[in-house]
Image (cartoon, grey):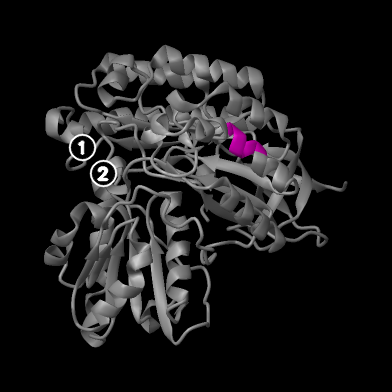
Amino acid sequence: MEDKPTELKYMDESLQGTALSGDDERGDRKLYIESYGCQMNFSDSEIVASILAKEGFGTTRNVEEADLVLLNTCSIRDKAEQTVRKRLSSFNKLKDSRPELKIGVLGCMAERLKDKFLDEEKLVDLVVGPDAYRDLPNLVEKVEGGRKAVNVLLSKEETYADVSPVRIDSNGVSAFISITRGCDNMCTFCVVPFTRGRERSRNPETILAEAKELEARGFKEITLLGQNVDSYLWYGGGLKKDFDKASDAAKATAVNFANLLELVAEAVPGMRIRFSTSNPQDMTDEVLHAIAKHNNICKYIHLPVQSGSSRILKLMNRGHNREEYFNLIDRIRKIIPDCGISHDMIAGFPTETEEDHQDTLSLMKYVRYDFGYMFYYSERPNTYAERKMEDDVDMETKKRRLNEIIALQGEHALERAQEHVGRVEEILIEGNSKRSDSDWKGRNTQNTMVVFPKTGTEKPGDFVKVKITDCTSATLLGERVQD
């Protein structure tokens, strides 16, 4: 779906949308979707395509021939929203020449702005929140009848457990399975709890069924998705916060994330399993031991920290402090010695001092992350930080601190990559290298991208042995080793 985990990312530039990777000729009408932001949005777009396929919509990657254009949006930062607004503006001429074309906004930005979106963006015909995609057939019918349509209602249940996604943005090797929706953590800077609602989990039987279906179709890797996968808890349905009210029988048979990992690993032993995203305060040793136990669970954890300062972490309402994060890192290194770890980091959170910033740099030096996603702070409307905290770190300071974080991460990424040189590692081939059709690209268990020359005997979806001979800070270079 995306290559971003292998690259050092400065997430200040505009988020790039990803359109459909192929055409689906089924259906009399054509649907064009662009997805922005997190992996959940890409997964949700596949659900949308599945729902609309039953209404006669085939997918297309050519916006010029589309009858319905949908933008699946992100609200995590102001820059993300501005990128979507610019993209909507680019549809002006298209709509002028084809007034029958319908344009809709999906996802977190849609939920946050609701009816206001229709007033601000005159081109937009429908606005649909993340839990309302099942209502798309009715909304599209309303729009085609000449009316505007909005549905941004949030659900108390996992809304799409029985929908078989159309893998519209897939390389045919890796796929995504949503296991939870929403978040209860209420970090002060984050808009997700307001746009995606409270945490609720999906029935594990449907997750296992989807994994087995993907295996039968030839996929070799799945990523279990959620805003906070560590909070996965199935006790028969409903919000996680209501678990205490469940019956004793429901509690006794409840499935947590560690249980789910093991169930999936055993159900599809020939497939690689990844997951994203984790929150430090919710990750248990039980999960770490499950990863260590099963060879097909990848030895990689994305573990956002956001700051290295305990004072700032408290203001962020992260639920952990610096020392607790260090302790978790130590346990990961002990239980899974070869685990790859990545991070999210925010520079310039309100009241951040130079001492706080130095705490962030020292935390990075302690962990030595494989890679990371780095941002400077921007206020998100209606969050606690926007309502109660002054954005008092000037932009020049934010950018300087961010650049120092980026530079240090670059050093660590190269150091971590160099540790692989000389090893023989199992790589799952994903496809042609971006730079040369004579090379393959694929990932090791730590989620690092590996590029190596083709020998003519392998194909995408194959697991192959590669000896790592060189590296950059983002990519390992190697040569195929015959089994």
**Residue extending furthest right?**
483
Q: Name the secondary structure under disc 1.
A: loop
Alpha-carbon distance for marks 1 and 2?
A: 8 Å
| Residue range corresponding to the magenta coloring | 258-262
Q: Residue at x 61, y 34 (%)?
A: 259
Is the Cβ of the residue at disc 1 closer than 8 Å to that at disc 2? yes
Which residue is under mark 1? 383
Q: Which residue sits at x=17%, y=30%? A: 394
Q: Position of residue 85 (x, y in %)?
A: 23, 61
Percent coordinates x, y for residue 373 in the rendering = 42, 38
User: The disc labelled 1 sits on which kind of residue?
Assistant: Thr
Q: Earlier in the sequence, mark 1 or mark 2?
A: 2
Vertical comparison of 26 with 268: above or below: below
Q: Is mark 2 on a helix, strand or loop?
A: helix
The amino acid sitting under disc 2 is Phe
Q: How many marks?
A: 2
Q: Which picture quadrant has residue 461?
A: bottom right
Residue 141 appears anywhere in the view: yes
Q: In this view, does 67 lie to the left or right of 189?
A: right
- Residue 207 percent coordinates (x, y): 58, 50
Q: Is the magenta stretch mostly helix, strand or loop?
A: helix
**Is 261 included in the stretch rendered in magenta?**
yes
Q: Determine which of the numbered discs, if any, sits on residue 194 in the image.
A: 2
Q: What is the quadrant of residue 136 in the picture?
A: bottom left
Q: Residue 14 carries which label?
A: none
Q: Can you tell which quarter of the image residue 280 is in?
A: top left
Q: Visible in this render: residue 460?
A: no
Q: Answer whether residue 70 is magenta in the image.
A: no
